[in-house]
Amino acid sequence: MRSCCFFILISTVACVKLPKEEKVKDKLELEGDKYLQQSDYRNALTSYLKLIKKDEENPAVLNKISISYFYAGVYEKALYYIYEAIRMDESNAVYYYNKACVHNKLGQYNYAIIDISYLIMQAHNDPFLYSLRAELQVKNGNEKEAIQDFEKAIALNTNDAVSWFYYGILLQNQNLAKQGREALEIAYELDPSFKGSSPELGDIEINIEPSVE
């Protein structure tokens, strides 16, 4: 339902966007960046992996290797390399977001919740993070926690139709029919495409994608 990407604690449209850096990049990194932008993940990996052999302590390149594996569908390796990036740079919020993306793909929702919770500690007024954690809570079977997170997301962004919609369904599941109907009516007003649909909570699709910082 929701497709978003995280850039330095700011939610935006999902994409792979290469950073503007003052540091002069190695030729192999430039090649890898070109292939990554072209969605040529095999060649991107070839370039980045050659580079990391020369420069093993480079978390930014490790992150790009993780992203390349992510889009190639090799999630276990994506997870390994993003862990390595975090080990070398524990302060980079983007890496924690990217780790959550991989955990989500692997169905490891509890670990993804931990990563997003860490980011919320850094940016406690970001409605996207609360809404994302709520959706992960649903996937992990934590409906009451999901309600709390959707409430926080809605308080920070009252125009978020997706949050209102799933919030309404959750309230109805908790035998709060009147409050649930009211929340759903707000969702329908914000986004008429929700009218007539009756998805189950299990239908929530969390399509989050990693960022290159």
Image (cartoon, helix red, strand yellow):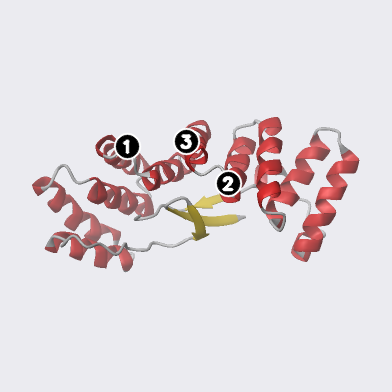
Label 3 to label 1: alpha-carbon separation: 12 Å
> Foreground mark, 2 or 1?
2
- Answer with mark 2 or mark 1, whichever residue precedes in sequence: 1
- Of residues 74 and 151, the one drawn nearer to the viewer in this rendering: 151
Residue 125's disc is 2
Q: Give the residue drawn at x 75%, y 51%.
A: 165
- Answer with mark 3 or mark 1, whichever residue precedes in sequence: 1
Residue for badge 3? 118
Disc 1 crowd, CA 10 A, few/some/many (<14, 14-19, 20+): few
Quarter of the image with the C terminus in it = bottom left
Residue 20 locus on image (x, y percent) = 29, 64
> From the viewer's perspective, is residue 99 above or below residue 15?
above
The answer to whether residue 173 is left or right of residue 1 is right
Tell me the kind of residue under disc 2.
Asn
Label 2 to label 1: alpha-carbon separation: 22 Å
- Of residues 147 and 108, the one drawn nearer to the viewer in this rendering: 147
> Foreground mark, 2 or 3?
2
Q: Give the residue drawn at x 31%, y 38%.
A: 86
Q: Give the residue drawn at x 90%, y 42%.
A: 178
Residue 81 locus on image (x, y percent) = 28, 41
Inspect this view and state whether residue 119 appears: yes
Residue 134 locus on image (x, y percent) = 63, 40
Tell me the kind of residue under disc 3.
Tyr
- Of residues 175 and 41, the one drawn nearer to the viewer in this rendering: 175
Residues at circles 3 and 1 in contact by the CB criterion of under 8 Å: no
Tell me the kind of residue under disc 1.
Glu
> From the viewer's perspective, is residue 148 above or below residue 95?
above
Label 2 to label 3: alpha-carbon separation: 13 Å
Quarter of the image with the N terminus in it = bottom right
Residue for badge 1? 90
Q: Which residue lies most toward the left here?
A: 54
